[in-house]
Image (spheres, rainbow, N blue to C red):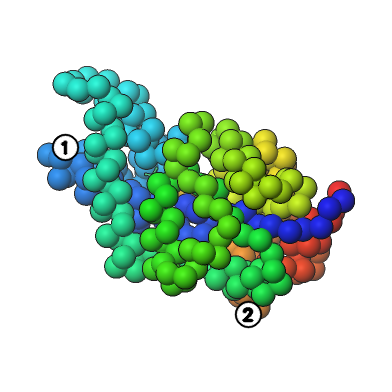
Amino acid sequence: MSKLEALIFDVDGTLADTERDGHRVAFNQAFKEAGLDWDWTPELYGELLQVTGGKERIRLYVEKFLSDFKLEEDITAFAANLHKRKTHFYLELLKSGAIPLRSGVERLIQSARDVGMRLAIATTTTPENVTYLLSSTLGKESIDWFEVIAAGDIVPAKKPAPDIYTWAMEQMDIKADACLAFEDSLNGVKSSLAANLKTIITVNDYTKDDDFSGASLVLDQYGEPNLPFTVIEGDAMGYDHVDIELLKQIHAKS
Ligand code: XBP
Ligand code: MG
């Protein structure tokens, strides 16, 4: 069994609760600006999360939920243009500091750095969304803490395909058995498990009922020394918050 050398994090839902009060809001701002009377309520957005990727989500909405919507242009170009504006509004939200990191994320990243663990990101979101989130929460320099930021359209097949994780590990020249992945959703865990990565899940309101079979541990949050996590599935081996020692034990378990 190789040593645990690297942690690979998903972003949306894992590092921060970005979907309901971040991405969703930005999509609605873009729709309004474009003169569309679409309103993605928190509930509808939950259904649209079945696909990853914002452009793919717009397409799903038009094709499955708005069957009589007439488009004068190609759906791919239409979704891409609308999505550009959505990204603009989302970055404005991040710049305003509206989206904090989830509990324990900053501590875990800092302690991984302290012990020389390698860090990477594997996400379906647009690359700037990642760098703006890191800058607005951990400071601009934190972008360089991550050896690889694998994001967005860098691989054509988004999660649940394993490609984004595989691509990140290729860039790092590292094998899956020397890494752990961190996810929050069904599409995320399908992707990381298909890339042969042991995976730790922290659920959120949109993903708490997802099927996380195959994950090493499912928690409500990473927690802090004075803010214990709740175990949803798996064996936390007596720990009450996620730290490097727990990660090493999970990694070592067959
Ligand atoms: C995240 C996504 C993304 C974001 C929006 O999934 O599906 O589409 O919702 O980002 P995961 P963009 O956490 O599994 O990577 O609009 O930039 O695509
Ligand atoms: Mg996610």
Residue extending farthest left: 35
Can you see residue 232? no
What is the quadrant of residue 82 in the picture? top left
What percent of the width, then of the height, locates residue 15? 51, 60
* Nearer the camera: disc 2 or disc 1: 1
Q: Earlier in the sequence, mark 2 or mark 1?
A: 1
Residue at left offset 64%, top offset 50% = 172
Which numbered dot is residue 226? 2
Residue at left offset 15%, top offset 45% = 33
Q: Is residue 15 left or right of residue 109?
A: left
Can you see residue 22? yes
Q: Which residue is mark 1?
A: 36
Q: Is residue 252 above or below residue 189?
A: below
Task: Indicate the secondary structure of the residue bearing disc 1.
Answer: loop
What is the three-letter code of the residue carrying label 2?
Asn
Question: Is residue 182 or residue 47 the one in the foreground?
Answer: 182
What percent of the width, then of the height, locates residue 169? 65, 46
Task: Indicate the secondary structure of the residue bearing disc 2.
Answer: loop
How far apart are the two marked residues, 2 and 1, measured between alpha carbons? 47 Å
What is the three-letter code of the residue carrying label 1?
Leu
